[in-house]
Image (spheres, rainbow, N blue to C red):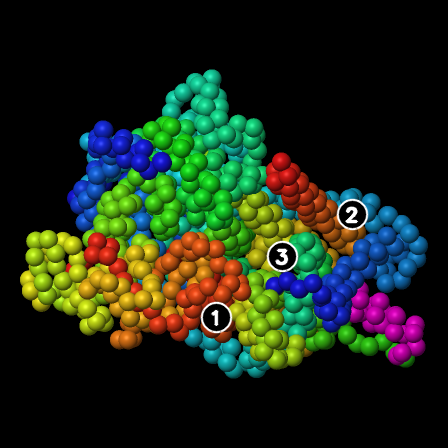
Amino acid sequence: MTNPVRPAQFLKSFGRGLVSGIPYFWLLLFFVIPFVIVLKISFAESQIAQPPFTDLTSFADDMLTISLNLFNYIDLYEYDLYLDGYISSVKIAGISTILCLLIGYPIAYAIAKLPPHARNLALMLVILPSWTSFLIRIYAWIGLLKNNGLINNALLGLGLIDEPLVMLHTPIAVYIGIVYAYLPFMILPIYTNLVKHDHTLLEAASDLGATPAAAFFKVTLPLSVSGIVAGSMLVFIPSVGEFVIPELLGGPDTLMIGKLLWSEFFNARNWPGASAVAVVMLIMLIIPITIFQRYQAKDLEAIADD
Amino acid sequence: MTNAGIGRWSWMALVSGFIFLYVPIFILMFYSFNESRLVTVWAGFSIKWYGELFRDEQMMSAVWMSLKIAFLSASMAVVLGTMAAIAMVRFGRFRGKTMFTGMITAPLVMPEVITGLSLLLLFVTLSQALGWPAERGSVTIWIAHTTFCMAYVAVVVSSRLREFDRSLEEAAMDLGASRLGVFFRITLPIVAPALLAGWLLAFTLSLDDLVIASFVSGPGSTTLPMVVFSSVRLGVSPKINALATLLVLAVSMATFIAWWYMRRQELIRQKEIQSAFNK
Amino acid sequence: MATEQSNSQIENKKLVQLEIKKLEKDFDGFKAVNNISLDIYQGEIFALLGASGCGKSTLLRLLAGFEMPTAGDILLNGQSLIGLSPHERPINMMFQSYALFPHMTVEQNIAFGLRYEHLSKVEITRKIDEVLNLVQMAQYAKRKPHQLSGGQQQRVALARSLAKEPKLLLLDEPMGALDKKLRTQMQLEIVDILESVEVTCVMVTHDQEEAMTMASRVGIMDAGVIRQIGQPIEVYEQPNCRMTAEFIGSVNIFEGTLSVDEPDHAQINCPDLPVPIHVAHGVVGSFGMQLAFALRPEKVRVDMEKPANAHNFARGVIEDIAYLGSHSIYHLRLPSGKKVLASVANSDRLVTGDDAPRLTWNDEVYLSWSEKSGVVLSA
């Protein structure tokens, strides 16, 4: 006997449709379609008008003409500025990610070893700065790194240096800024992973003759890989497109693609050019974003299946 | 993972980590009380920069604008993010689920310049085609912020929903509650703390955003980070230090009150459980 | 005791309260419940007993309305429940985890269901008092669930599901969340409460001791079907197939062929035994057919001397002895290599250092059983 479709049944599926449909539609309209438009406009030509780009399609003499303008992409290839920008963005983001990992892992490890009530407090202290203001935390480093800033003043005062070290507006300042701003995003996923580890595994390892160091490298580290990957992606992907940090802490020669996109858009008012920069950046980030989603989705689906 | 002894190396990592995280902020706050305009040379205690901050009308109207947008974005993000979380955790497999999950989590890592640019181009295209939005301003910022904040809310709420004991809902239905009744009388009260946490996270994220807002804002809708950014670009100013101090104090006070409250509840709970067993 | 009392009730009334007719539930091609038909009588406690994954929980959830059947019908007092949501069924359930609402007090938990009954405030309060007194939890009315011990939470869960006076009460692994000591105590307490309100009960459990203590009838479930239904004594002493014999308690199985088949006795030739198995009843079967003979360990006698009877014995060596206090389990090995368990009551006090001869490891012994102790099953 099959169930007749009852009003309650209908209401239930209608309700479910609404609950998943509304956010789906919102994200489709405000997250997916915008990318399609970016792609479209990256093939347009810049013009001085409102809006400042040409239409791809024109309709004249009963003919629909679609003109794809590849010059924006050719420009990206031909001007060393962009190519260098991409390379240096990936390099800066990559090195910063590794630095975050080297600094963040021991912190996450230490927090996971604290007694439970202290753990929550420590965790909160890690997150707290990121609830204040990104901009202001970057701004704080300007005062520290300037030629007449606190670090230089202190070093000069101690007689360790004779003339101020140039730190602000150098790549070093950008590294410091990224590590400082994104460190919590590395610590959190690693901590979440480590805190779930069964401590008896380490006891078993040492019972079987492993030294604490060997137990760490053979048991703890391999088990925390998923936390490391998640944390690294959370740092790497946004860093590649970072704008505020290179703008405030980097120098004119610190090329980063987020900054190039910004100036292409706001200063040169070349919208198609900026779109092409964005499209290439997105293509570059597809692999890391997919890795991130794999690790995220594994979590989400493991539960939905049971 | 628990261990009675946290080793010397771990302590060092923890202490130096917190020094790295907090010293720049404390120095920033310290110099907000400096008499001098130069933020690096101490010239005596003064609170004049706080006065100047409150007299800065552009800054104050930007604060108001940012708070308004953050409040509305966080509220909308909680509604949409919760729906998305329910769909992800509760609906099992459905058509388009992979894409749905992808769309929810992608904004978490998407570089802001891309999100900002793409939303701006969407708004321009829409206004060309439909005449809406006629001009960019607080509404477009609200849409943009809701979109990326709902991803965070969805993650927070879905992790709470996944821990949720489904038999509570079945018990409620078994006792006569309809689906809607179950949701409002059982599910919602129990996940409420996660909704609040999601709202607060969304609120701070919206309040903090510079890049996306810069793309999608229009004349007359300047948010606080935009004002701070243009001021910081021109160099350090004690007024910004004063603003930072107030912001840090507000956030840490709110956090510590929440933490203290939760800790107290936990202690009361433990005491009650003990007395229950001692009887 | 409780069991006998309810047996006599059934004999008197035998009114069918719940009819399950050819019920089926299919999960993506997997038949969790496969064509089950079952009658539950008014006032009885019926236990569905089976290993995890046998479909017993699915059957319970079909009754509660959390799952919709693929085919078949469920009738409560003659009326079909198919298509009714859980909240529309006059059936309540006590959950394994108790599912007490953590944000409500004991009182509010019980009031939750009563609110949907359109009762006055006074009446709701009266009912709450009534059920809390029934489970002896009246003094805890204002507590929240987390302030209660496991046993107390269980009483509240029971009170909450009884408050609505359901026509049928479902119990999902009622003792699953309690520790062993508390279990035995609560089993009898709950049976007393259930019998005092005369509610019809279907419970699900994987614990045979629990099923046999609490239920008046037991259904053994396996792979989506009910293999045997009967009173606890029936399913233990007269299993109808190897599966039930092996599932309930432990059992020795001897495989053999039918050699003698008379109306009043039969013999089975078993290659593991030196003499045929002799049973005191006829087996309706063909000569030479394959059969299995099931013998419970407590029905096996162990002696040093050769028993007098001509059938039903074998020689064996003691391989292992598990001393369990009240009795000991002897692990015996026959010359053929077949292993047999024998449970022997420790009726004499065993004192260390006592030099009375006692059975010990590697002793050669005789095992034997009477012609009425075993059950013949199809192989």
Query: From the viewer's perspective, is A297 left or right of A222?
Result: left
Q: Name the foreground residue: C359 vs A182.
A: C359
Which of the chains bears the disc numbered 2? Answer: B
Q: Residues within 10 Å of mark 3 (few under 14, many from 20)?
A: many
Q: Amino acid at mark 2?
A: Leu
Q: Residue at x 36, y 41 (%)?
A: C214
Q: Residues within 10 Å of mark 2 (few under 14, many from 20)?
A: some
Q: Which residues are magenta?
A: A142-161
* Residue assigned mark 2: B53
Q: Is residue B4 above or below residue B74?
A: below
Q: Position of residue B67 (x, y in %)?
A: 64, 44
Q: Element at badge 1?
A: helix
Rounded to the nearest angstrom, the CA distance separating label 2 from label 3 is 20 Å
* Residue assigned mark 3: B210
Quadrant of the image containing the C terminus of chain C: bottom left
The number of discs equals: 3
Is residue C33 one of those drawn in magenta?
Answer: no
Q: Residue at x 52, y 37 (%)?
A: C152
Circle nearer the N terminus (2, 3): 2
Q: Amino acid at mark 3?
A: Leu
**Res C203 → quadrant:** top left
Q: Name the foreground residue: C170 vs B217.
A: C170
Q: Is residue A206 above or below residue B114?
A: below
* Residue assigned mark 1: A291
Q: Position of residue A70 (x, y in %)?
A: 43, 75
Rounded to the nearest angstrom, the CA distance separating label 3 from label 1 is 27 Å
Q: Amino acid at mark 1?
A: Ile
